[in-house]
C-alpha cells in the first residue's frame, strides 16, 4: 500500500498517524487519469493537454510519483504508469484505519489549540510591532530593559540551542513559538515541532503546524526525511524558474508564494545525538535549507562528538549555562560560566554582538 492517502478534500496524507500532509494540485486527479490513459507521464503531455506551464507540470509529476502512480524519473524518458486505474489507486488508499484517523484528527487537534494560553504581555508587544511587516522575525528573549530582542529569520538561518541541565530552554522555545504563531500567517510560515519531553504540546492545533507535535524519535526521522524532500523540490523549482533561492522566487509575480518552514527539535534527553538518520538529515538541511526557505532550531546537549561537530554548521547559537571547560571550548564562549540563573542565556547571532538575555 502507498504511504499516502487521497481524501475527499483534495489532500494527500502520509498513511501513518501524525506524519506530514501536503496539498495537491487541483489538477491532480485529471493529471493522474490522463497519464494512466496514455500509459506514461511527461511534462510535455501535461502542459499540452492541461494547458499549464512547465513548473506546474513538473510538480504534478513529482506528486504522481510520490503517491505511487508514476515511476521515478529516468532522465528525459516518460515516466511509466504503475497502477491499472485511478479507481484502483484511490481504493488502495482508503484503509478503514486511515480514513477513521483522517476524520477524527482535525477535531481532536483543534480542541487542544488555544492561543490565549500562549500569549504573554512581552510577546503581545512583539506581535503588535511586527505582524504587518513582510519580514518574518524570530523573537529570542528579553533584554535588561524587558524588551523582546528579535532577529530576521533569514538572518538567523539555522539556530543551535545548548540546553544544559536544569536550564529553561524549552520555555524559551515555547516563547519563540508563542510569538511566531500569534504574529505570522500560516500562509507565510509552516512549523514542524519535535519535543521528546512533551513540553511544547500546547502549540498542537496551531494552523501553522504541518503535523501534530512529534514526541516519538522514530517519527522525527520521517518528518526530517519529508523536509529534505521538500528542500530538494524547492531547489529544483528555483532552477527551473531561473531564480537564485527562496527570496527571489517569492519576489516573482503571478506565482503562489512559498511559506518558510521552521523545524523545531527539542532533545533534552540527548537522544537525537545517537540517531544517525536524523543527524544526516540535519546536516543536509544545514547545507541547503536556507536557500530553500527552510530553517531549524535544534535544542540539544553536547553529548556526542558527531553532534558537537555538526553544531559548528549552525549560524546562530543560544547558550545556557555551561559547567565544564570542554563544553565552553566546543561552544566557543567562556561567558556562559558566568550566567547566574537557569532563565539566562547568551544569544550569539551570525552578525552582531553577543547579548545576555532571559526568557
Image: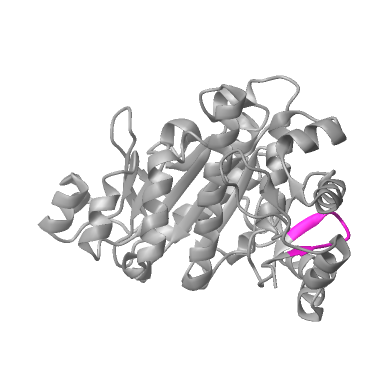
x and y percent of residue 194 in the render?
51, 62
Residue at image point 68% right, 28% down: 132
Q: In this rendered view, identify the residue nearer to me: 83 or 7.
A: 83
Q: Is residue 340 left or right of residue 287?
A: left
- Is residue 283 on the magenta stretch? no
Q: Residue furthest bottom?
A: 96
x and y percent of residue 201 in the render?
59, 66
Please say whether residue 211 is visible from this viewpoint: yes
Q: Quadrant of the N terminus?
A: bottom right
Where is 173 relative to 247, above or below?
below
The mark total stands at: 0
x and y percent of residue 113 in the render?
71, 61
Q: In this rendered view, identify the residue nearer to me: 251 or 315.
A: 251
Residue at image point 80% right, 49% down: 35
Q: Is residue 2 left or right of residue 149?
A: right
Residue 19 occupies quadrant: bottom right
Residue at image point 40% right, 48% down: 284
Where is 191 relative to 111, above or below?
above
Range of magenta residues: 5-12
Amino acid at each position: 500500500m502507498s504511504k499516502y492517502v487521497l481524501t475527499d478534500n483534495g489532500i494527500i496524507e502520509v498513511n501513518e498517524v501524525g506524519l506530514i500532509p501536503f496539498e495537491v494540485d487541483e489538477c491532480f486527479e485529471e493529471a493522474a487519469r490522463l497519464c494512466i490513459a496514455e500509459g506514461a507521464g511527461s511534462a510535455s503531455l501535461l502542459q499540452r493537454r492541461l494547458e499549464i506551464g512547465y513548473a506546474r507540470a513538473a510538480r504534478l509529476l513529482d506528486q504522481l510519483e510520490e503517491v505511487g502512480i508514476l515511476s521515478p524519473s529516468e532522465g528525459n524518458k516518460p515516466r511509466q504508469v504503475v497502477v491499472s486505474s485511478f479507481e484502483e489507486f484511490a481504493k488502495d488508499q482508503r484503509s478503514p484505519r486511515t480514513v477513521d484517523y483522517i476524520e477524527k484528527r482535525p477535531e481532536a487537534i483543534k480542541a487542544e489549540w488555544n492561543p490565549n494560553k500562549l500569549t504573554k504581555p512581552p510577546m503581545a508587544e512583539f506581535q503588535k510591532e511586527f505582524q504587518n511587516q513582510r519580514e518574518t522575525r524570530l523573537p529570542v528573549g528579553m533584554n535588561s530593559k524587558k524588551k523582546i530582542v528579535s532577529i530576521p529569520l533569514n538572518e538567523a538561518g539555522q539556530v543551535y540551542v545548548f540546553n544544559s541541565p536544569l536550564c529553561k530552554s524549552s520555555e524559551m522555545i515555547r516563547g519563540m513559538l508563542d510569538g511566531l504563531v500569534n504574529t505570522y500567517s500560516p500562509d507565510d510560515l509552516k512549523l514542524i515541532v519535535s519535543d521528546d519531553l512533551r513540553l511544547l504540546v500546547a502549540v498542537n492545533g496551531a494552523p501553522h503546524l504541518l503535523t501534530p507535535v512529534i514526541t516519538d524519535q522514530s517519527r522525527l526521522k520521517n518528518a526530517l526525511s519529508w523536509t529534505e524532500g521538500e528542500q530538494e523540490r524547492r531547489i529544483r523549482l528555483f532552477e527551473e524558474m531561473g531564480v537564485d533561492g527562496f527570496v527571489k522566487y517569492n519576489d516573482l509575480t503571478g506565482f503562489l508564494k512559498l511559506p518558510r518552514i521552521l523545524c523545531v527539535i527539542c532533545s533534552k534527553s540527548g537522544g537525537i545525538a545517537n540517531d544517525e538518520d536524523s543527524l544526516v538529515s540535519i546536516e543536509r538541511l544545514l547545507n541547503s535549507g536556507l536557500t530553500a526557505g527552510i530553517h531549524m532550531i535544534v535544542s540539544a546537549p553536547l553529548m556526542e562528538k558527531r553532534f558537537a561537530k555538526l553544531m559548528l554548521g549552525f549560524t546562530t547559537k543560544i547558550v545556557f549555562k555551561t559547567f565544564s571547560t570542554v563544553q565552553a571550548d566546543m561552544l566557543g564562549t567562556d561567558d556562559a560560566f558566568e550566567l547566574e540563573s537557569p532563565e539566562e542565556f547568551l544569544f550569539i547571532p551570525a552578525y552582531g554582538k553577543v547579548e545576555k538575555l532571559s526568557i
